[in-house]
Amino acid sequence: MTTRSTKPKPGSVPKSRPNVPKTGRPIPPLVLPSGGGLGIPAESPEGDQILLSIGELSEATGVPSETIRIWERRYGKPEPIRLASGHRRYDESHVHWLRRMAEAVSRDYRPSQVARLSDAELDRLIAPLADILRDPELAALLAMILEYRDVDLRATLLDMGRRVPALTFLRDRVVPLVRSVSCWWADHRFAVRHEHLLSECLQDVLRALRIETQPAITERRLLLTTLPGDQHDLGLHMAALLAARHRIAATLLGRDLPETELLTTIAETKPYGVCISVSNLVGASQLVRDLAELRAVVPPQVALIVGGASLRSLKRSIPGITHLATFVDLDHHLAALATD
């Protein structure tokens, strides 16, 4: 059975593909029902297994297709199902494993360490459910997400963000909340729709908190974006809030900005520097290549600052680039910049 991949709009939930085989019998759609489960039926009513292309597997797990190929080549996982046509396809077990693998990598475990674990060992590695539920504030926020109480979620997070310094809010509430949702998503308690709901609410809250800050007092400007192809932009909004609290002008350019557009913006705005947010799922070798290529084309007088936990996997620093692995590192850098 062959499948056809359709690319969803940024921020949308991947939709099922209309696919009718030669028999005229429609294939059951890929849905994410409430009550848990991946929403990918193991078999159709007449016994045909539902299989995904690598693009659809990427959409269902949030792991880039190139990363999936690298893990398969290096670690033998996920091992695809080979069709008679030679095409690779993946089933629900691959989705389940990739979600848990991605969650472990996001906690700074090396892919080479995680890939050799058994299913039971991997489950123990990423299952801090008891720790999550011991925090009543965090448990209440998770309940709001699960019950689609987005108005309450925004109001509660906004109140939290107004009561404490920006770094404290990000480090002690936003980051643990995002990690908890990722954990429950990997464990099938949450689905893509819940993760998207949280992302939209957090972006609204971070924007609101940023708008409430005082105007910038320094003429130095920072441009914030991701590497081309990186669809994860929540880190940009967090970095922008920290910059605003230090009263540094920060211009959000969003995710997946083409290199030519970034270079044009640099020429037109003459910024102090460019901040690049890197997701945890970008492979180390690919990250080094992309950043080295970017450093080569960005004017040397423009600082290039890269943030993200995945930087810890790099064996060496990249010349001409400032590496900031945590929000604490970024906050210290911004504080020094504001007083320089």
Image (cartoon, rainbow, N blue to C red):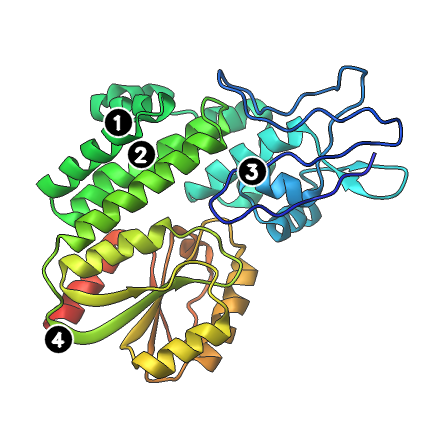
Give the residue at mark 1: 138
Q: Looking at numbered disc 3 in the image, what kind of residue is underneath it?
A: Thr
Separation of residues labelled 3 and 2 (CA atoms): 19 Å
Q: Nearer the viewer, mark 1 or mark 4?
A: 1
Mark earlier in primary sequence (3, 2) = 3
Identify the residue at the far front of this view.
24
| Mark 4 burial class by Cα count in 10 Å: few <14, some 14-19, many 20+ | few
Amino acid beneath label 2: Leu
- Label 2 to label 4: alpha-carbon separation: 34 Å
Q: Residues within 10 Å of mark 2 (few under 14, many from 20)?
A: many
Q: Nearer the viewer, residue 78 or 192?
A: 192
Spatial CA distance of label 1 from label 3 is 24 Å
Q: Which residue is mark 3?
A: 61
Instruction: Please identify the quadrant where the C terminus is shown.
Output: bottom left
Q: Residue at 67%, 21% (x, y): give it.
A: 41
Indicate which label's residue lies in the foreground, 4 or 3.
3
Q: Quadrant of residue 83?
A: top right
Dot in front, 2 or 4 = 2
Amino acid type, residue under disc 1 in the picture: Leu
Q: Which residue is mark 4?
A: 340
